Image: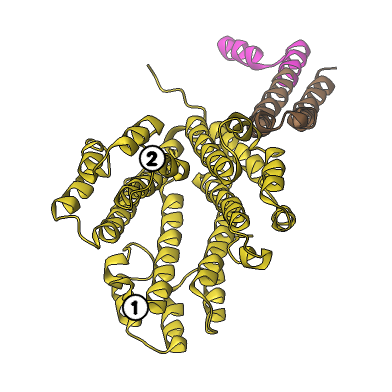
């Protein structure tokens, strides 16, 4: 009987434990948000960057324009970062 | 060393470069403007475009039509060589295979020139060292005195076995047309076997080969119909297109033009080509038909390159369009040299 009472007490979570767990989940969510958007940005920039380098190799005048086009997918990772920061703070 | 896998990036890079180069090709308005110019004005005008380097380099030694001819050939060869350098992986193999067409053309030009007693300098002007045979090999072949020596000089190259076999049969009147047909048939058979070998991008390459073979066969059909004494159509038919050689043989026997076109249209898959064939019911000269067929081929290649933007299609579309830009400028220069009226020269331009 005493053993059963000890086991129940061990599975019950304290308030500190719940808070720590919530913080952990938030950190995990923030990490996923930044990580996945980073991958998305990378994939998008791979295609745009290759095309940008190709276009610049043929016509140097377009460098400024293609640089701008290449960084447009950066917005995706910035959204991820914002979501991550909102989760954490 | 482990192969570095770069994904689609190199394809995107090369195809974008081809698109930019295609955008730099001379527009229709430029040809129309050149039609009203003299030879020296045309030289100055093309010097302001991407031909500047070649014109500047050759201007001290050549002038007039020779300068333009040589500058155009050099530019085309340089362009083709540079494309072979920048294309990645299987695209390089496919581009090289396609450019072997120039080997056939160069060898036949040298043989034809030698048989007609042309000077080496004159033959050199029209050669495009874009395929397996580079400038050094072609220069060596030009200096050879007899066809036997020229063919010997090709030992180990792709065109050698067929040429030597045909040559052993004897140099007769029809040696060159016969060998030309055989070489092109072998060229297309090699392309088809390469496209079907499981190479990456082979399916798209096959689409291009089919279109090219169809256009070649249709052009030959109209040529042979206009001049039945030109030889046997069966020798010139290239197998592998959507129109089967048996069908071509059968419909070539049809004398009435309308019936001939009615029999031909159902086997043609390309819509623009079918529409063009409809317009050919009216009598047109072979040259006009050829120009119309080239236009359809170029527009079809353009739409193929839009459907498959990162494949062999944008590269092939640019290569073909560049080839016809050179043809146009040559036709313009030659026309002006021969004092032909602008309307007559216009008929030779693909624009």
Rendering colour (chain B) = yellow
Q: What is the x, y in percent for residue B200? A: 41, 42
Q: What is the x, y in percent for residue B272? A: 56, 70
Image quadrant holding the C terminus of chain B, namely bottom right
**Residues indicated by labels 1 and 2 sit on the same polypeptide chain:** yes
Secondary element at tag 1? helix
Q: Note the chain letter of the brown one.
A: A
Residue in view at x 34 percent, y 38 percent: B142
Q: What is the x, y in percent for residue B119? A: 39, 43
Crowdedness of circle 1 by 10 Å Cα count: few (<14), some, many (20+)?
few
Tell me, yes or no, whether the highlighted magenta stretch contains residue B271: no
Q: Nearer the viewer, residue A77 or B211?
A: B211
Q: Which residue is mark 2?
A: B120
Return the mark for residue A42: none
On the question of residue B127 being in view, the answer is: no
User: Which residues are drawn in magenta?
Assistant: A1-26
Which chain does the numbered disc 1 sit on? B
Asked if residue B338 lies left or right of residue B231, the reply is right
């Amino acid at each position: 009987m005493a053993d059963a009472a000890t086991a129940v007490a061990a599975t019950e979570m304290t308030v500190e434990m719940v808070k720590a767990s919530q913080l952990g989940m938030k950190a995990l969510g923030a990490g996923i948000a930044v990580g996945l958007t980073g991958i998305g940005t990378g994939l998008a920039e791979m295609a745009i960057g290759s095309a940008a380098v190709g276009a610049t190799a043929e016509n140097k005048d377009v460098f400024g324009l293609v640089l701008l086009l290449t960084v447009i997918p950066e917005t995706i990772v910035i959204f991820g970062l914002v979501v991550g920061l909102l989760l954490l703070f | 060393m482990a192969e570095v896998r770069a994904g689609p990036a190199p394809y995107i890079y090369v195809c974008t470069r081809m698109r930019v180069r295609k955008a730099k090709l001379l527009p229709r308005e430029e040809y129309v403007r050149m039609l009203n110019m003299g030879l020296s004005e045309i030289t100055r005008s093309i010097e302001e475009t991407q031909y500047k380097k070649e014109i500047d380099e050759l201007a001290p030694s050549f002038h007039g039509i020779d300068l333009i001819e040589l500058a155009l050939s050099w530019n085309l060869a340089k362009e083709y060589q540079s494309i072979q350098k920048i294309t990645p992986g299987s695209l390089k193999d496919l581009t090289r295979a396609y450019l072997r067409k120039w080997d056939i053309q160069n060898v036949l030009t040298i043989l034809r020139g030698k048989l007609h007693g042309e000077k080496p300098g004159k033959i050199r002007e029209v050669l495009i060292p874009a395929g397996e045979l580079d400038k050094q090999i072609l220069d060596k072949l030009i200096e050879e005195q007899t066809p036997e020596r020229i063919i010997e000089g090709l030992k180990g190259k792709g065109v050698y076995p067929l040429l030597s076999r045909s040559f052993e049969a004897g140099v007769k009147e029809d040696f060159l047309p016969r060998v030309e047909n055989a070489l092109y048939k072998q060229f297309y058979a090699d392309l088809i076997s390469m496209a079907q070998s499981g190479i990456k991008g082979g399916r798209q390459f096959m689409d291009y080969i089919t279109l090219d073979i169809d256009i070649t066969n249709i052009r030959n059909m109209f040529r042979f119909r206009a001049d039945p004494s030109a030889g046997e159509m069966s020798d010139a038919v290239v197998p592998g297109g959507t129109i089967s050689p048996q069908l071509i043989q059968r419909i070539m026997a049809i004398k009435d033009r309308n019936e001939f076109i009615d029999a031909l249209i159902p086997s043609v898959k390309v819509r623009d080509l079918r529409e063009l064939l409809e317009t050919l019911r009216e009598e047109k000269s072979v040259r006009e038909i050829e120009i119309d067929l080239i236009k359809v081929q170029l527009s079809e290649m353009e739409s193929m390159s839009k459907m498959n933007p990162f494949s062999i299609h944008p590269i092939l579309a640019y290569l073909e369009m560049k080839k016809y830009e050179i043809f146009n400028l040559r036709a313009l220069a030659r026309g002006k040299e021969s004092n032909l009226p602008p309307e007559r020269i216009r008929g030779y331009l693909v624009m």
